[in-house]
Amino acid sequence: MIVSWRNRRAHNNKMKNNNRLCEDLDAEINVPTHFRCPISLDLMKDPVTLCTGITYDRENIERWIEAGNETCPFTKQVLETFDLIPNHILRRMIQDWCVQNRSLGVERIPTPRIPVSQCEVSEVCSRIVGATRRGDGKKCGELVRKIKNWGKESERNKRCIMENGTGCILSASFESFARDSFEKHINLLVEILLVLSWMSPLGKDGRSKLGTESSLRCIIWLLRNGDLSGRQSAVLVLKEILHSDDRRIITNTLRAIEGVVEALFFLIKEPISPTATKASLMAIYCMISSTTKNDMITSRFLEMGLVGVIVEAIVEADKSVCEKALGVLDEICNTEKGKEEACNNALIMAVLVKKVLRVSEWATELSVSILWKLCDEESVRIEAIQVGTFKKLLVILQVGCGEGTKEKVKELLKLLNVYNNRVDCCVDSSMGFKYLKKPF
């Protein structure tokens, strides 16, 4: 049976997936159905055969099995074994077919690499342990790069690497070389962080090794002085370390390390990537939420202007960044100095009201919580009325929300109702912010 596809040009961009065939009004491509995966109906790139004799694309059947399914998707038979046997003959046939149809825009699928095995990962990990004990940074670097290259090949390889305790071993190696002399082994330490940055969760033992003072000093140094890739890896690992039950102890250790506040602050003020921005916000939240209200770290963030930077970031932020930024702002407003800084910001009221019911339920709850904390001052209540807060709060009650948020909304409505008929709403919260004077 032959299925007909039309060939289309992909807007001058190179085709990202070899299984996506271009369409053209003038030409037709006949794709044999046995070249297509029964699950996705896309052209197979790495065909593998189950014990039932049915061939699937490796990525699709692995996802099916990992979802907990124990039957063959096509025959519905219970699988006696989950072994996936590469179908080399079919793969070569598909490659030959791609070459024959090259003139119609079909690109040849590359020959897939054999997935890494648990034995290979365990062997490399053992050699890393030995190289670390000997202090052989060169050999250790070669082995870490091997793991990094395995991870680049496929998500399956990454899962296999993580499931074999590699994160804990690399964390111990990082701690050992950082304690010895991190400037001497800086290239190796950067390589280890690059691998650790996609290993989550690291586990208690791994976080324990990375949470030592010598490891944290190295991470903060890279956060301040590394290249873009190094800085992103460092903040991702720092976020992972802080996102644990020991974050109060780790925060106390960070308090003695110079430059941690400045490094995280500038990753938000001068973002290098959305991933780094989100990791920075989460790290900041963990640090300020695990300290006392008048802690030195929180005060230092406020002195540098964190409130203003976060408010600016929220204006055009996507959902994930917006939620994390609002979470940090909500935590800051638990302190008197934080509330004072927030009240003095010219954009904050308009930004908070604008984000209500527009981003997510969680963002709405955080925005209401911040408004509830700030509306102690009469001047703040008047500004809240002016930017349309009263109407938005009524809408929240109509739409529905959690009990805690509902109580805060009711309290805010009582506070603002006094001014509702006396103050003109001079700013529409749905408008842009170009007419508002920014604090910097």
Image: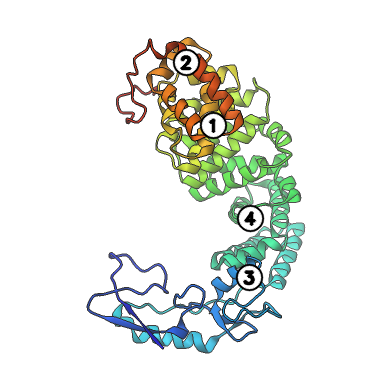
Between the C-alphas of marks 3 and 1, the distance is 39 Å
- Return the disc, 3 or 2, that comes first in the chain's sequence: 3
Q: Amino acid at mark 3?
A: Ile
Q: Secondary structure at mark 1?
A: helix
- Vertical comparison of 355 with 130: above or below: above
Q: Please indicate whether residue 216 sits to the left or right of residue 59 in the image.
A: right
Category of crowding for the residue at label 4, using alpha-carbon neighbours closer than 10 angstroms: few (below 14), some (14–19), many (at least 20): many
Please name the residue shown 71% across and 33% down the image: 248
Foreground: disc 2 or disc 4: 2
Q: Amino acid at mark 1?
A: Leu
Category of crowding for the residue at label 1, using alpha-carbon neighbours closer than 10 angstroms: few (below 14), some (14–19), many (at least 20): many
Please name the residue shown 42% across and 74% down the image: 19
Q: Amino acid at mark 2?
A: Leu
Foreground: disc 4 or disc 3: 3
Is 110 in front, or is 333?
333
- Residue hosting label 2: 416
Tell whether label 1 touches label 3 (CB within 8 Å).
no
- Residue hosting label 3: 65
